[in-house]
């Protein structure tokens, strides 16, 4: 029988002793993580939702999934944040209240081990609703961004930070549709704000997850190399070739796909 995918020396169709001698499936996983990172990086996202969906399909141990996703988020978002900051497209003043409010929630969420089926169902529905909202939202050409109220930014940041820590998705897929729907940022600005938001929340969330006793996959270094390569290519594509409308529709498609993946791979 053939091995489909492996992690931690396990295979879906081969004994563990035989799987250890086959590096191929692990390499394939690394390439898939890279492809996910590329697609998400075009809109300033790291890929946490799809990382989790891929790991579920590859039969990762549940205790590995959240820390591995957060670690890959850190790798992908670090590069994207560096590039967006270098290009001077990150509005740090707008990001500050969102970020400061989100970090305590991310840490608290990281300490909580959520029921897997409840997490997948709830997150999948939220992502589907966010994707549909973004598709049917009318684009108002030339409309300026609204001033972001501090209380609103703190409320959104705290809520998204908690979800980030609970699920391991980094929070960008929840933050982005909120910013766009409330007209707090344009699609391009949202992409630039999402990357550092994901980076900070993933670092805090991973710290809490490790403290709670969950550890990433032993093959993390190879998976991280794939994620970094995808982030490099995806960030360049997003900055140079994506218009505002294209960014919005790609992000909507990602949200819908991630929602379907989380609901299907229960």
Image (cartoon, grey):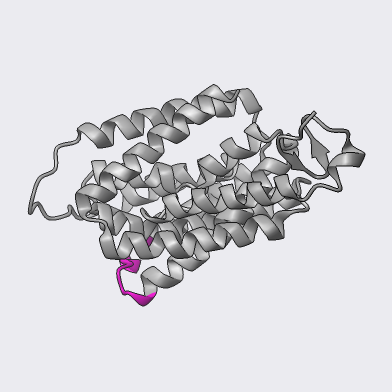
Image quadrant of residue 254?
top left
Mark yes or no: residue 18 visible: yes
In this rendering, is residue 178 above or below 79? above
**Can you say which quadrant of the picture contains the N terminus?**
top right
In this rendering, is residue 221 above or below 173? below
- Considering every residue shown, the one lying at the far front of the view is 1
Rendered residue at 35%/61% (across/down):
237
**Can you say which quadrant of the picture contains the C terminus?**
top right
User: Which is nearer the eye, 200 or 64?
Assistant: 64
Image quadrant of residue 252?
top left
Tell whether 10 sits left or right of 200. Answer: right
Rendered residue at 64%/39% (across/down):
55
Tell whether 131 sits left or right of 221. Answer: left
Residue 159: x and y in percent read 45, 42
Count of number-bearing discs: 0
Residue 166: x and y in percent read 59, 39
Residue 243: x and y in percent read 21, 55
- Considering every residue shown, the one lying at the far right of the view is 17
Tell whether 37 sits left or right of 224. Answer: left
Image quadrant of residue 257?
top left
The magenta segment is 86-96
Tell whether 151 sits left or right of 266. Answer: left
Rendered residue at 10%/45% (across/down):
140
In this rendering, is residue 72 above or below 13? below
- The verdict on residue 237 being magenta is no
């Amino acid at each position: 029988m053939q091995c489909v995918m492996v992690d931690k020396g396990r295979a879906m169709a081969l004994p563990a002793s035989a799987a250890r001698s086959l590096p191929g499936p692990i390499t394939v996983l690394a390439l898939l993580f890279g492809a996910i990172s590329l697609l998400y990086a075009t809109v300033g996202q790291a890929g946490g939702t799809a990382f989790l969906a891929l790991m579920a399909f590859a039969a990762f141990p549940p205790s590995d999934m959240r820390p591995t996703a957060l670690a890959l988020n850190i790798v992908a978002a670090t590069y994207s944040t560096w590039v967006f900051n270098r290009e001077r497209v990150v509005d740090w003043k707008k990001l500050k209240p969102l970020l400061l409010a989100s970090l305590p929630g991310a840490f608290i969420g990281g300490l909580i081990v959520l029921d897997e089926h409840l997490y997948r169902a709830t997150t999948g529905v939220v992502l589907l609703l966010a994707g549909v909202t973004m598709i049917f939202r009318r684009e108002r050409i030339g409309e300026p961004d609204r001033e972001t109220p501090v209380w609103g930014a703190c409320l959104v940041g705290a809520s998204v930070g908690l979800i980030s820590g609970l699920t391991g998705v980094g929070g960008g897929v929840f933050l982005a549709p909120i910013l766009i729907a409330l007209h707090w940022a344009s699609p391009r600005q949202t992409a630039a704000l999402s990357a550092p938001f994901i980076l900070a929340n993933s670092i805090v969330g991973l710290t809490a997850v490790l403290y709670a006793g969950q550890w990433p996959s032993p093959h993390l270094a190879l998976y991280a190399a794939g994620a970094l390569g995808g982030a490099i290519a995806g960030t360049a594509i997003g900055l140079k070739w994506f218009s505002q409308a294209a960014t919005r529709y790609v992000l909507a498609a990602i949200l819908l796909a991630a929602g379907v993946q989380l609901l299907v791979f229960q």
